Image: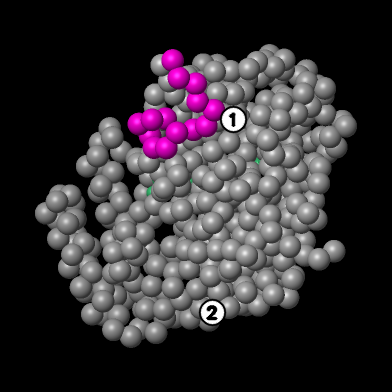
Amino acid sequence: MSKRNIVVIGTQWGDEGKGKVVDWIAPHVSAVARFQGGHNAGHTLVINGQKTVLRLLPSGILHPEMRCFIGNGVVVAPDALEKEISELEARGVAIRHRLKISPACPVVMPYHVALDVAREAKRGAAKIGTTGRGIGPTYEDKVGRRAIRVCDIVTGEGLAEKITEVMDYHNFVLKNYLNASTVDVDLVLEEARKWGAMLAPMMADVAHDLMTIARSGEGILFEGAQGTLLDVDHGTYPYVTSSNCVAGQASAGTGVSPKAIHHVLGIAKAYTTRVGTGPFPTELFDEVGKGIATRGKEFGSVTGRPRRCGWMDIPALRRSIDVNGVDSLAIMKLDVLDGCEEVKMCIGYTVGSTLLDRLPAGADAVAKCVAAYETFPGWKMPTQGVRSFEALPVEAKAFLQALQSEAGVPISMISTGAERDDTIMLMNPLNF
Ligand code: GDP
Ligand code: IMO
Ligand code: MG
């Protein structure tokens, strides 16, 4: 079988189960690469009952030989990365020799966290509900051409001058506009030097290394973070994250040619969740929603915040399928719908007298959408842990078939539990 390069992308508002899918597919490729986001991501793997939450490390890392890459599109918090690496090392997972980080990654600095937190406080009720990890301010510095990048802290060249200049600006904003405490320049410089020494052995020409793997045909898995509806351009702006989360970013965020990508695998829960503020047309406020939240353990893996829950939203999924060029879907957490009397699927929106079949752009337009549902009978027999399509209850099969037909792309995987092997593979996405 000739190996292929595949992008795993969230089609909703994040936490779809990307980590589980990446870990599951990883044995079929030789490298896993992150291409955007930072430690705002929380990707959970459950293997033989042991849970691991990954933030910056690619979700292939638990496969001992897997080569892992952090591409230029990722914002790197060295302290968070060091913690994540040492926690896994303490469990006997060797990482530093097989993790490569692009010199072009912007570094999440202490003042970015201070700015993120102070801005959210100033917005009050209108806050975005960020993860408070400094992600937005770091991306702002990147496009503002004043970021401190991995290469800056590793080489140390002109570092003191760069940090002093950028902090002069940010401390002014913190003090005079946000009424918040400033950040000490000397302390930041000391930290940055320490981080540079830690990152030096892992800094590498990620773009070239990945293109070499792509040319050899060994297979690369590009791991998306967040989800399409949180994409800074295509999501529910301004209630979004600060990066492009769509499949096209796999190329820009690693330096691998878009021509080297063969399959886009869209990940969706059988329902929908969202953390943070912003419109959510299929949100449930009743006991059914609470049941989904409880059974699905819907609490953020990064911040522990409860996730808002609602029904599957096909117009939103159609938008994601379009902007990512999704070739096939992985439907996750089917088991969480076990026990529902009936299961609903939003198949369109009404806005006044207008019918929409796709999520419109931006939060204001989405807030006007009223979900129109199709209702399906629930299933009595549990799907939890079922590992073949044939063994699923007939009602669950009907729900999945309707979903596939409304979405217009094939379902290639179904997940029926958090465990690695609670997975039904309908067709191998690497075999197309
Ligand atoms: P990611 O950010 O897309 O990687 O997703 P998260 O890890 O943040 O959230 C998904 C959560 O659902 C994690 O706790 C997973 O362990 C869990 N999970 C994944 N697939 C399934 C599934 O099919 N059933 C159940 N019950 N849990 C799942
Ligand atoms: P994974 O990769 C779910 C959300 C935050 C907030 C918005 C902006 O685990 O799916 P940010 O800190 O990025 O500036 O916050 O984006 N958010 C996520 N929601 N899963 C994530 O990652 C998220 N990363 C950011 O809750 O609404
Ligand atoms: Mg997550």
Q: Quadrant of residue 106?
A: bottom left
Q: Residues within 10 Å of mark 2 (few under 14, many from 20)?
A: many
Q: Quadrant of the N terminus?
A: bottom right
Q: Quadrant of residue 27?
A: bottom right
Is residue 358 one of those drawn in magenta? Answer: yes
Span shown in magenta:
353-366
Q: Residue at x 46, y 53 (%)?
A: 244
Under circle 2, the secondary element is: loop
What residue did someone put label 2 on?
204
Q: Quadrant of the C terminus?
A: bottom right
Q: Amino acid at mark 2?
A: Ala
Q: Can the viewer see residue 133 in this picture?
A: no
Under circle 1, the secondary element is: helix
Is residue 21 one of those drawn in magenta? Answer: no
Residue 45 position in % (x across, y down)? 66, 50
Position of 51 with respect to 196 (left or right) is: right
What residue did someone put label 1 on?
314
